[in-house]
């Protein structure tokens, strides 16, 4: 696997790969890789002739006081895993390479970018959209792979791809969970043993809501009440949001119908976790 630090070199390599007629798949990450990331790589490998990945802990998507400095960095181990999974080229720029002094352009996805995590973390999705737009310009993939766990991020990026005419397909991939149901996240590393147990209330609550929906409870208000009671009743857990929304616009919907997104964000101790499901 080639490891590339400079934008110009990455652009050059990706241009040559595309010229060879290869369908280029791309998996952007912030590193600290787990099975969730590896599932994106495997899907990209199954669907594209050649796969590029990136590791960049993007300072622009962290607000002051958030966990940018503590974010787990496991570069050597990540490289080993990506190499084993057959990634051809890894882009791992320094912050100055992505944001040289004098760079002032931001990508803001209005409205949708201020909903769910965008409401709780103002400016977060401008940071995400800006870095992903830049990465798309550098790599110019045919397909880019993102986890459905970050459902709001996926919705924001779909809107951006449409609005800015990126010539690529965004592929949303299923959430990968530990055996006990906890959605995989690089931030799970922050949890103590006790907090990890407490964190299970997120997936458990979503499952209870899913079961109620299967038993024909469709009213969002009733479902949200059920979920909030469970989450608020758990020691060590502080609910950020529980929402039933249109999966494309992230706007609340009154009734939990097919294709609707049920999403939760909560602090377990000091760690903010998210989870969700799409109604089948
Ligand atoms: O989901 C992530 O890991 C990040 O938000 C992304 C898409 C790599 C942008 O920094």
Image (spheres, helix red, strand yellow):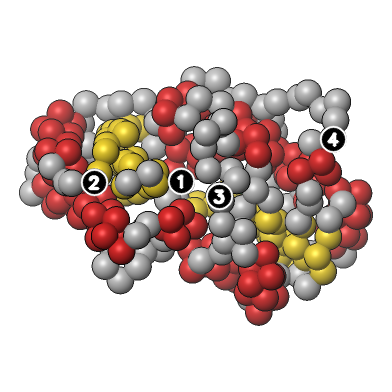
As drawn, the label of residue 150 is 1
As drawn, the label of residue 100 is 4
Q: Residue at x 82, y 28 (%)?
A: 103
Q: Position of residue 63 (x, y in %)?
A: 56, 31
Instruction: Tell me how far mark 2 sits from mark 1, CA to CA.
Output: 23 Å
Q: Give the quadrant of the N terminus.
A: bottom right
Q: Counting other residues with Cα less than 10 Å from the Cα at mark 2, is it few (<14), some (14-19), or many (20 or more)?
A: some
Residue at disc 3, CB closer than 8 Å to ligand 1: no
Instruction: Tell me how far mark 4 sits from mark 2, CA to CA.
Output: 41 Å
Q: Quadrant of residue 77?
A: bottom right
Specify which label sits upstream in the sequence, 4 or 2: 4
Specify which label sits upstream in the sequence, 4 or 1: 4
Q: Is residue 259 visible?
A: no
Residue nearer the viewer, 1 or 92: 92
Tally of marks? 4
As drawn, the label of residue 236 is 2
Q: Residue at x 24, y 46 (%)?
A: 236
Q: Position of residue 188 (x, y in %)?
A: 41, 58
Q: Position of residue 251 (x, y in %)?
A: 36, 25
Q: Residue at x 62, y 54 (%)?
A: 29
Q: Residue at x 82, y 41 (%)?
A: 96
Query: Which residue in the protein does label 3 denote?
Result: 70
Q: Nearer the viewer, mark 2 or mark 1?
A: 2
Residue nearer the viewer, 237 or 113: 237
Specify which label sits upstream in the sequence, 2 or 1: 1
């Amino acid at each position: 696997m080639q490891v590339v630090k400079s934008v110009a070199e990455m652009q050059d390599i990706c241009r040559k790969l595309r010229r060879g007629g290869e369908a280029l798949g791309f998996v952007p990450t912030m590193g600290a890789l787990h099975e969730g990331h590896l599932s994106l790589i495997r899907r990209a490998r199954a669907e594209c002739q050649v796969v590029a990945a990136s590791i960049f802990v993007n300072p622009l998507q962290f607000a002051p006081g958030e966990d940018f400095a503590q974010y787990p960095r496991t570069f050597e181990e990540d490289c080993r895993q990506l190499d084993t999974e057959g990634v051809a080229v890894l882009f791992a720029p320094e912050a100055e390479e992505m944001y040289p002094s004098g760079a002032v352009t931001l990508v803001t996805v209005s409205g949708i970018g201020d909903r769910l995590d965008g409401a709780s973390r103002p400016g977060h999705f401008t940071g995400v959209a800006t870095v992903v737009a830049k990465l798309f310009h550098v790599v110019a993939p045919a397909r880019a792979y993102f986890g459905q766990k970050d459902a709001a991020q996926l919705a924001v990026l779909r809107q951006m791809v449409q609005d800015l005419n990126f010539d690529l397909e965004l592929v949303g991939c299923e959430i990968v969970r530990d055996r006990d149901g906890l959605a995989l996240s690089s931030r799970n590393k922050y949890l103590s043993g006790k907090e990890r147990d407490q964190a299970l209330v997120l997936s458990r609550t979503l499952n209870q809501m899913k079961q109620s929906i299967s038993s024909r409870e469709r009213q969002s208000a009733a479902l949200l009440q059920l979920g909030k009671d469970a989450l608020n009743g758990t020691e060590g857990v502080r609910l950020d949001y529980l929402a039933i929304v249109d999966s494309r616009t992230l706007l609340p919907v009154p009734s939990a119908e097919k294709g609707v997104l049920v999403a939760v964000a909560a602090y377990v101790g000091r760690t903010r976790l998210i989870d969700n499901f799409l109604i089948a």
